[in-house]
Image (cartoon, grey):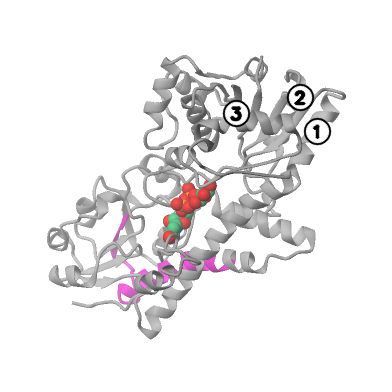
Amino acid sequence: MKIAMVGAGYVGLVSGVCFSDFGHTVVCVEKDENKLAKLRDGQVPIYEPGLDQLLEKNMAGGHLSFTGDLAAALVDADACFIAVGTPTRRGDGHADLSYVLESAREIADAMPEDLVVVIKSTVPVGTNRKVAETIRQQRPGAAFHMASNPEFLREGVAIADFTRPDRVVVGLESEHAEAVLRAIYRPITSRQTPLLVSDPETAELIKYASNSFLAMKITFINEVANLCERVGGDVETVAHGIGLDSRIGERFLNAGPGYGGSCFPKDTIAFAQTGRDAGAVQSLVEATILSNDQRKSAMADKIIQACGGDVRGKRIAILGVTFKPETDDMRDAPSLTIVPALQAAGAQVVACDPQAAHEARDMLPGASWSNGPYEAASDADAVVILTEWNQFRGLNLAELAACMRGTTFIDLRNIYNADEMDAAGLDYWPVGKRPSLS
Ligand code: UDX
């Protein structure tokens, strides 16, 4: 099939590259000149493991290209995917649809007969119809078809999530659109991946409900972790114990400093707003948003408590600042709340992160940076694991303790355990378990 992909960000670039790897011919449209130049040069402007090789292979294969000219991308296209950003609109929490509607108008001006316009961006319920209306107004009488095709990609594992998804969801109301999307996804749905066909609103709801439920599941175990720290109990064992119930499932029950990223925070807010506007308040999602926001500042208090209640003049090493490992994405990362709170309490923060330093420096003013965990820990009164990068999973704790000034180790991802901390003479503060003071 011939596909135009509007937007070459986290979603559009992964989707476009993977579609071209399925054998389709893909033209990605990117308006940002710098990004476009990098992409045309075979460089990937984001950090996503494996994407650079896949991009290079398919550009060399001649069925993946990049342009700033949407009309050119639409020549003979069977489908045009809209994968532009839908950030949270300042003030009212709604998703900002300006980029989506701007793309729709440009598509309308240049679309070929019977084009299938597919919305892949995460958009509030009803957007599919709004885009259809925008196109109709722009090109009265033109024949085109609409579809919604939400993505469920996790950063850091986006290629695996795209090529081996749990399901493909398409919301549409035309046989032609269904035929085209079935043809586009045939390389994966032929391997028994279910393709769920619904109306547009249902597909839009599935995306928001899915992310909101996952965010709620994480927040649930984070609140259970708070209880474990007070009444005793081990949150990892609680998570394992409840997760063995197949109706609950073990995944997404790792207690931590709270969720971040470009999706959960904005999607929960947009979903809650949709509920409010529709008169169907999503009270559990609203409670999730509140709880998660409070957790990030509560983590700073936990660190201060672990340092004896006062961090003035103390040096605190933060290992990991991105919202999760295997990404350079800092959007809504817990570090953006935790580090300033520690600095406001008088601490001197030194951070290290395998991927984020270049972007994070400006986002964490006043923090100093080091190239590795041992350098960050030297002369530190406390070490904090904030993001569970593999580079922090096999630390030589005796060596780390030897270069520290203090003995406090706060593990907000429960990578380590009390015995190995005790052996290294370190005071261990995990999440959802009692601290173990050597
Ligand atoms: C998420 C959804 O998983 C994905 O399906 C959707 O398309 C986009 O949003 P992403 O935000 O990339 O993907 O990362 P994810 O791995 O889901 O983690 C989100 C946040 O939750 C991270 O801050 C992570 O640290 C946190 N998390 C995740 C936990 O705290 N505990 C967990 O058990 C899992």
Find out whether the residues at labels 2 and 1 contact each other: C-beta distance under 8 Å: yes
Secondary structure of the residue carrying numbered label 1:
helix
Name above or below for residue 169 compared with residue 415.
above
- Residue 183 bears which disc, if any? 3
- Residue 81 bears which disc, if any? none
Q: Is the distance from the Cβ of mark 1 to the nearest ligand 1 atom less than 8 Å?
A: no
Left or right, 311 with reference to 100: left
Q: Name the residue under label 2.
A: 108
Name above or below for residue 353 compared with residue 42.
below
Give coordinates of residue 21: x percent, y percent.
Answer: 46, 26
- Residue, x 25% and y 45% (percent of image)? 371
Q: Sequence-wise, which precedes: disc 2 or disc 1?
A: 2
* Residue 306 on the magenta span: yes
Q: Quadrant of residue 213?
A: bottom right
Q: In the rendered structure, which amino acid carries the disc numbered 1? A: Thr
- Residue, x 61% and y 39% (percent of image)? 85
Q: Mark 1 points at which residue?
A: 134
- Residue, x 83% and y 23% (percent of image)? 139
